[in-house]
Image (spheres, helix red, strand yellow):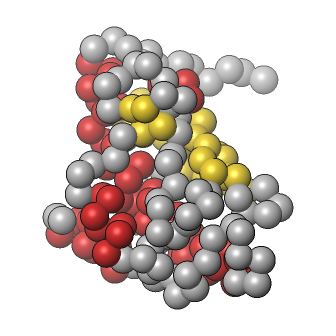
Protein backbone atom coordinates (compact mmCIF):
# COMPACT_ATOMS: atom_id res chain seq x y z
CA UNK A 1 0.00 0.00 0.00
CA UNK A 2 1.33 3.43 -0.96
CA UNK A 3 2.13 6.24 1.47
CA UNK A 4 -0.84 8.28 0.22
CA UNK A 5 -3.23 5.38 1.00
CA UNK A 6 -1.70 4.92 4.44
CA UNK A 7 -2.05 8.65 5.16
CA UNK A 8 -5.71 8.60 4.05
CA UNK A 9 -6.40 5.46 6.10
CA UNK A 10 -4.83 6.91 9.23
CA UNK A 11 -7.48 9.65 9.18
CA UNK A 12 -10.49 7.33 8.87
CA UNK A 13 -11.78 6.14 12.25
CA UNK A 14 -11.72 2.36 12.66
CA UNK A 15 -14.88 0.52 13.62
CA UNK A 16 -15.27 -1.82 16.58
CA UNK A 17 -18.62 -3.56 16.35
CA UNK A 18 -18.65 -6.79 14.34
CA UNK A 19 -22.26 -6.80 13.17
CA UNK A 20 -24.23 -7.00 9.94
CA UNK A 21 -27.80 -6.05 9.03
CA UNK A 22 -29.22 -9.35 10.38
CA UNK A 23 -27.80 -8.69 13.83
CA UNK A 24 -30.77 -6.85 15.31
CA UNK A 25 -28.99 -6.15 18.61
CA UNK A 26 -25.68 -4.77 17.37
CA UNK A 27 -26.47 -3.43 13.88
CA UNK A 28 -27.64 0.01 15.16
CA UNK A 29 -24.31 0.40 17.00
CA UNK A 30 -22.33 -0.65 13.91
CA UNK A 31 -24.36 1.75 11.76
CA UNK A 32 -23.60 4.61 14.16
CA UNK A 33 -19.88 3.80 13.89
CA UNK A 34 -20.20 3.72 10.07
CA UNK A 35 -21.75 7.19 10.02
CA UNK A 36 -19.09 8.61 12.38
CA UNK A 37 -16.32 7.13 10.22
CA UNK A 38 -17.87 8.38 6.97
CA UNK A 39 -18.50 11.88 8.33
CA UNK A 40 -14.88 12.11 9.53
CA UNK A 41 -13.56 10.89 6.15
CA UNK A 42 -15.72 13.39 4.22
CA UNK A 43 -14.67 16.25 6.55
CA UNK A 44 -10.99 15.35 6.06
CA UNK A 45 -11.52 15.28 2.28
CA UNK A 46 -13.19 18.70 2.34
CA UNK A 47 -10.32 20.14 4.42
CA UNK A 48 -7.79 18.95 1.84
CA UNK A 49 -9.99 20.06 -1.10
CA UNK A 50 -10.41 16.44 -2.10
CA UNK A 51 -14.18 16.05 -1.75
CA UNK A 52 -15.26 13.37 -4.25
CA UNK A 53 -18.48 11.66 -3.14
CA UNK A 54 -21.81 12.05 -1.36
CA UNK A 55 -23.60 9.09 0.24
CA UNK A 56 -26.85 8.47 2.03
CA UNK A 57 -28.67 5.35 3.12
CA UNK A 58 -32.15 4.04 3.62
CA UNK A 59 -33.53 4.14 7.18
CA UNK A 60 -32.19 0.65 7.99
CA UNK A 61 -28.71 1.44 6.67
CA UNK A 62 -28.80 -1.57 4.35
CA UNK A 63 -29.02 0.24 1.00
CA UNK A 64 -26.68 3.12 0.13
CA UNK A 65 -26.75 5.52 -2.79
CA UNK A 66 -25.26 8.81 -3.86
CA UNK A 67 -22.84 10.38 -6.28
CA UNK A 68 -19.14 10.29 -6.86
CA UNK A 69 -17.13 12.48 -9.14
CA UNK A 70 -13.72 12.56 -10.72
CA UNK A 71 -11.91 15.62 -12.07
CA UNK A 72 -9.99 15.00 -15.30
CA UNK A 73 -8.37 17.81 -17.31
CA UNK A 74 -10.29 20.31 -15.15
CA UNK A 75 -13.65 18.73 -16.07
CA UNK A 76 -15.87 17.13 -13.45
CA UNK A 77 -17.29 13.71 -14.37
CA UNK A 78 -20.13 12.67 -12.05
CA UNK A 79 -21.65 9.22 -11.56
CA UNK A 80 -24.46 7.71 -9.52
CA UNK A 81 -23.28 5.05 -7.09
CA UNK A 82 -25.18 2.44 -5.11
CA UNK A 83 -24.59 -0.63 -3.01
CA UNK A 84 -26.26 -2.93 -0.53
CA UNK A 85 -24.68 -4.01 2.71
CA UNK A 86 -24.04 -7.77 2.33
CA UNK A 87 -25.70 -10.04 4.90
CA UNK A 88 -22.19 -11.29 5.79
CA UNK A 89 -20.95 -7.71 6.41
CA UNK A 90 -18.46 -6.70 7.82
CA UNK A 91 -16.68 -9.95 6.90
CA UNK A 92 -17.65 -9.24 3.27
CA UNK A 93 -17.07 -5.77 1.84
CA UNK A 94 -19.94 -4.01 0.05
CA UNK A 95 -19.86 -4.20 -3.77
CA UNK A 96 -20.05 -0.63 -5.01
CA UNK A 97 -21.85 -0.18 -8.33
CA UNK A 98 -21.80 2.58 -10.94
CA UNK A 99 -24.78 1.46 -13.05
CA UNK A 100 -24.22 3.89 -15.95
CA UNK A 101 -20.77 2.40 -16.60
CA UNK A 102 -22.07 -1.18 -16.70
CA UNK A 103 -20.51 -3.01 -19.63
CA UNK A 104 -18.15 -0.13 -20.50
CA UNK A 105 -15.02 -1.57 -18.88
CA UNK A 106 -13.61 -5.02 -18.18
CA UNK A 107 -12.94 -3.90 -14.59
CA UNK A 108 -16.58 -4.34 -13.68
CA UNK A 109 -19.05 -7.09 -12.90
CA UNK A 110 -22.63 -7.38 -14.09
CA UNK A 111 -24.84 -4.61 -12.77
CA UNK A 112 -22.02 -2.07 -12.82
CA UNK A 113 -20.26 -3.43 -9.72
CA UNK A 114 -16.67 -2.26 -9.72
CA UNK A 115 -13.95 -4.88 -9.75
CA UNK A 116 -11.74 -4.22 -6.74
CA UNK A 117 -8.00 -4.79 -6.79
CA UNK A 118 -6.38 -8.01 -5.65
CA UNK A 119 -4.96 -5.98 -2.76
CA UNK A 120 -8.33 -4.78 -1.48
CA UNK A 121 -10.02 -8.07 -0.53
CA UNK A 122 -7.13 -9.51 1.54
CA UNK A 123 -6.63 -6.11 3.19
CA UNK A 124 -10.35 -5.93 4.04
CA UNK A 125 -10.25 -9.52 5.35
CA UNK A 126 -7.29 -8.77 7.62
CA UNK A 127 -9.05 -5.73 9.04
CA UNK A 128 -12.48 -7.14 9.97
CA UNK A 129 -14.35 -5.54 11.75
CA UNK A 130 -12.24 -2.36 11.73
CA UNK A 131 -12.90 -1.44 8.10
CA UNK A 132 -16.25 -0.04 7.01
CA UNK A 133 -17.96 1.88 4.23
CA UNK A 134 -15.50 4.82 4.38
CA UNK A 135 -12.64 2.36 3.89
CA UNK A 136 -14.43 0.74 0.93
CA UNK A 137 -14.73 4.20 -0.63
CA UNK A 138 -11.11 5.18 0.11
CA UNK A 139 -9.44 1.89 -0.83
CA UNK A 140 -11.96 0.60 -3.36
CA UNK A 141 -13.92 3.20 -5.27
CA UNK A 142 -11.34 6.03 -5.10
CA UNK A 143 -8.45 4.08 -6.65
CA UNK A 144 -10.84 2.45 -9.16
CA UNK A 145 -12.04 5.86 -10.40
CA UNK A 146 -8.44 7.14 -10.60
CA UNK A 147 -7.43 4.27 -12.89
CA UNK A 148 -10.59 3.63 -14.90
CA UNK A 149 -12.14 7.05 -15.53
CA UNK A 150 -9.14 8.63 -17.34
CA UNK A 151 -8.80 5.45 -19.42
CA UNK A 152 -12.51 5.47 -20.33
CA UNK A 153 -12.31 9.18 -21.23
CA UNK A 154 -9.23 8.63 -23.43
CA UNK A 155 -11.02 5.78 -25.23
CA UNK A 156 -14.07 8.02 -25.77
CA UNK A 157 -16.32 5.70 -23.75
CA UNK A 158 -17.19 8.49 -21.29
CA UNK A 159 -18.06 11.92 -22.64
CA UNK A 160 -18.13 15.11 -20.60
CA UNK A 161 -21.67 16.32 -19.92
CA UNK A 162 -22.35 20.01 -19.27
CA UNK A 163 -24.63 20.58 -16.30
CA UNK A 164 -28.19 21.25 -17.41
CA UNK A 165 -29.22 24.81 -16.68
CA UNK A 166 -32.40 24.80 -14.61
- Figure disc tally: 0
Q: Nearer the viewer, residue 43 or 95?
A: 95
Q: Is residue 152 above or below residue 36?
A: above
Quadrant for the C terminus in the image: top right
Tell me which residue sits at (60%, 36%) in the image.
80
Outermost residue, bottom side: 16
- Nearest the viewer among 16 and 154 is 16
Q: Residue furthest left?
A: 2
Whether residue 45 is visible: no
Q: Residue furthest right?
A: 59
Residue 71 place in picture, x, y as percent: 39, 38
Expressed as whole percent of the image width and height from the top left, the position of residue 150 reads: 29, 29
- For the point 62% across and 24% down, which residue is it? 163
Q: Nearer the viewer, residue 99 or 84?
A: 84
Query: x, y (%) of residue 22?
Result: 71, 69
User: Which residue is depicted at the point 60% across and 47% down?
Assistant: 83
In this view, 89 is above or below 152: below
Quadrant into which the N terminus falls: bottom left
Looking at the image, residue 89 sits to the left or right of residue 24; the answer is left
Q: Quadrant of residue 61?
A: bottom right
| Residue visible at 44% across and 80% down in the picture | 130
Q: Is residue 76 left or right of residue 164?
A: left
Q: Is residue 124 visible?
A: yes
Expressed as whole percent of the image width and height from the top left, the position of residue 93 reads 47, 60
Amino acid sequence: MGDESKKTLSKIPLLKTKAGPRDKELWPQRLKEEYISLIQYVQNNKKTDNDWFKLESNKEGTRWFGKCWFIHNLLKYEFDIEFDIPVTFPVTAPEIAIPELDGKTAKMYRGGKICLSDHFKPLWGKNVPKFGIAHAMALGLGPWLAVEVPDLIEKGVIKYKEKEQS
